[in-house]
Image: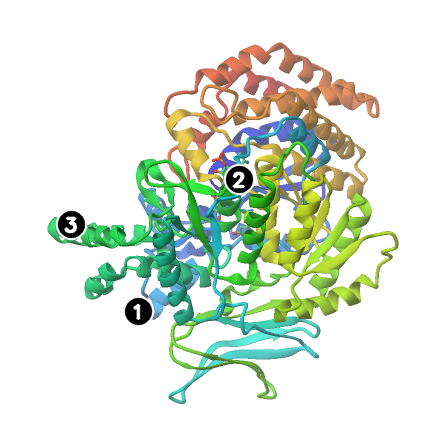
Amino acid sequence: MSSEPTIIYTLTDEAPALATYAFLPIIRTFTAPAGVRVEESDISLAARILSAFPEHLTPEQRVPDALADLGRKTLEPDANIIKLPNISASVPQLLAAIKELQAKGYQVPNYPGDPKTDEEKSIKARYARCIGSAVNPVLREGNSDRRAPRAVKEYARKNPHAMAEWAQASRTHVSHMRSGDFYHGEKSMTLDQARDVKMELITKSGKTLVLKPQVALQAGEIIDSMFMSRKALCDFYEQEIEDARKSGVMFSLHVKATMMKVSHPIVFGHCVRIFYREAFEKHAALFDKLGVNVNNGMVDLYDKIATLPESQRDEIMRDLHACQEHRPELAMVDSARGITNFHSPSDVIVDASMPAMIRAGGKMYGADGRLKEVKAVMPESTFARIYQELINFCKWHGAFDPRTMGTVPNVGLMAQQAEEYGSHDKTFEIPEDGVANITDLATGEVLMTQTVEEGDIWRMCQVKDAAIRDWVKLAVTRCRNSGMQAVFWLDPYRAHEAELIKKVTAYLKEHDTTGLTIQIMSQVRAMRYTLERVARGLDTIAVTGNILRDYLTDLFPIMELGTSAKLLSIVPLMAGGGMYETGAGGSAPKHVQQLVEENHLRWDSLGEFLALAASLEDLGIKTGNARAGILARTLDAATGALLNNRKSPSPKTGELDNRGSQFYLALYWARELAAQTEDRALAEHFVPLAKALADNEQAIVAEFAAVQGTAADIGGYYKPDDVKVKAVMRPSGTLNAVLAAAG
Ligand SMILES: NC(=O)C1=CN([C@@H]2O[C@H](COP(=O)(O)OP(=O)(O)OC[C@H]3O[C@@H](n4cnc5c(N)ncnc54)[C@H](OP(=O)(O)O)[C@@H]3O)[C@@H](O)[C@H]2O)C=CC1
Ligand SMILES: O=C(O)CCC(=O)C(=O)O
Ligand SMILES: [Mg+2]
């Protein structure tokens, strides 16, 4: 790797990956005069799959394990990474990606859903590392600092997005389990010393099944043992489905099958099977034979029955429809295409889906395309309760007003695979009734025990002491730098958080907190307290664990700014480097659909602009490169101009889109650089570029407008064709020539 100051820019998936094709040439044009290199790192789903199966590929097709390399980089003090959102793949997405790669001549193996041989088991294990939240836990070697920059918040205040009204009589509500979920019966402890432990099940019949042979734990680490009872979960679903039917509200299920990639697909699957109970009972043997697994959504069932004779298929479809007759209406993901909430577990992801529902006045779309009140089912009570508290508040207070509401930044615990991020290889569906133990390998001491039944989901989470210490420090720093109050959202009645509270209380004493207001409150109280302040225009930092980091950094920005894509999202890496994420949103699959059908990309790259400025600022400070600092300051000013001149992308085809918006960013950035007086040579360098961009504004914008309205061919979805995407994302010959001349 070069010793020049270097920014690593990730290549990911879907809309952000498309936007990158247009943005990288702009970035390089601007950073070259400062001697800043921009390296690419392809961590897309397709690249991760290819890197997992080198022996199935020709030498030319092989790709390095960029994610592992990048993971190592995060542990080096000079790491400076710009991380765009990537697909955390569900199984249906993985299957589609495999199919596309195979069709393109990459002989990666088929996904063995139900592996029998050792080889199949090994293939499945390798694919398991590609699915779900496979990237973020590896790269997030620091805690999370997400906030709305002042200019963005001010813009939202002056240009408020639409918020639907909340009726006090709304019947929309959240339903969660009252017992038998992970919250109830959770056990937690802080390690007195470093220990190696195993996770084992002692069955009622006397067998010992070692589920995880070894987990190395550090002194001071917090570990938890918790389980979700299948019986309690299924009873809960029965009751809630029936309750929705009786009360006439739609039924919707909100899980996060990507981040909780082992537990939540199972939780999802039970709901689907119960909803369609009679059909699943009647066709049990056939579904078994076909290997139907609705943990992967109804799409799995539709795919598997597609090969059956038509009459048999019709019978199944009729039986499924018959179930719907006595079930509540299902919330839709895409009413026009008949895609329900049960289609695929990655279609409804709680962090984005609940705020969208709340912003819509507590409504989701029904099959007839109308917005209706809904029962939002989130089985785990641990965090579901915050949404009910929010709904209560909205019903009483009415919708929030983006013109006046306060802001809620977040400091989130996630470093070193904290909490749920580290649980993937420690989550198990219990095969037989018994006792689930976490046992010290050296002494045989049972550290924690749970009595479980077949089908229960048992898991262990960990949080390292150093990660907690760093999180507390980050919270105090943010509190001091922003002048805002901070609240740790921690529930003393939850075993894990009771342990965290002890550490937080101790580590807060390590800092000078004079004049700061830092409180600890259980989640529901913290939500109420924060909302009371939000409504009065007051700002409050939410200091939370990993799940609430995820949930709240979509929730508040969506209400405050209309989208979480406009957040500044920084991960100060514990080893000294920095990772700059681009907003808190995902990879916006719907945007790709619009691009392919109408050649309009509504993706807003504001998150990339904010991240790049933060990355350059950090690079400037750490390498003493003054020009990087100037680039950062001028970029921030350009971003402000972009907002004020309303040059963000429009969702409507025919209007300015991502590409046009990036052009304006380049224009404003070049102007700012040409006008600054700190570095005259740098200013002179940018004068001709600023002039060329300004002189050609009309021609460039017209070239961007001309391509819209007809289909665009990008030659693939998970692995689009490089040349084709370049052509689609860089359609302005004039802009391309101006950038080339400046380089
Ligand atoms: N950091 C990461 O790597 C993350 C990855 N993901 C992954 O992203 C995928 C999609 O997740 P999903 O839950 O649908 O959430 P998304 O955030 O991708 O999409 C929800 C909606 O948010 C809006 N949105 C998000 N980003 C932007 C942007 N930059 N510009 C304009 N609008 C934006 C879009 O609204 P509209 O349609 O109205 O334009 C979009 O449809 C999944 O594969 C998920 O795993 C999710 C979160 C974080
Ligand atoms: O890691 C993931 O799968 C998604 C993370 C996410 O949604 C977030 O960081 O906000
Ligand atoms: Mg999120």
**Of 476 and 105, the residue lying toward us:** 476
- Rendered location of residue 15, percent (x, y): 49, 36
Counting other residues with Cα less than 10 Å from the Cα at mark 1, is it few (<14), some (14-19), or many (20 or more)?
few
Q: Of the residues under marks 1 and 2, which one precedes in the sequence?
A: 1
Q: Which residue is drawn at 53% across and 25% down?
A: 659
List the residue tagged with mark 1: 116
Q: How crowded is mark 3: few (under 14 residues within 10 Å), some or many (20 or more)?
A: few
Viewed as shown, does residue 463 lie left or right of 277? right
Residue 312 picture quarter: bottom left
Distance between the alpha carbons at the discs numbered 2 and 3: 42 Å
- Front of the two marks 2 and 3: 2
Packing grade of label 2 (10 A; few <14, some 14-19, many >=20) is many
Residue named by callout 3? 314
Q: What residue type is labelled 2?
A: Trp
| Residue 621 appearing in the image | yes
Left or right, 372 with respect to 396, comes to: left
Please identify the quadrant where the C terminus is shown. Answer: top right
Depth check, mark 3 against mark 1: the one in front is: 3
Closer-to-camera residue (168/615): 168
- Per the image, the residue denoted by label 2 is 166
Tell me the SS state at disc 2. loop
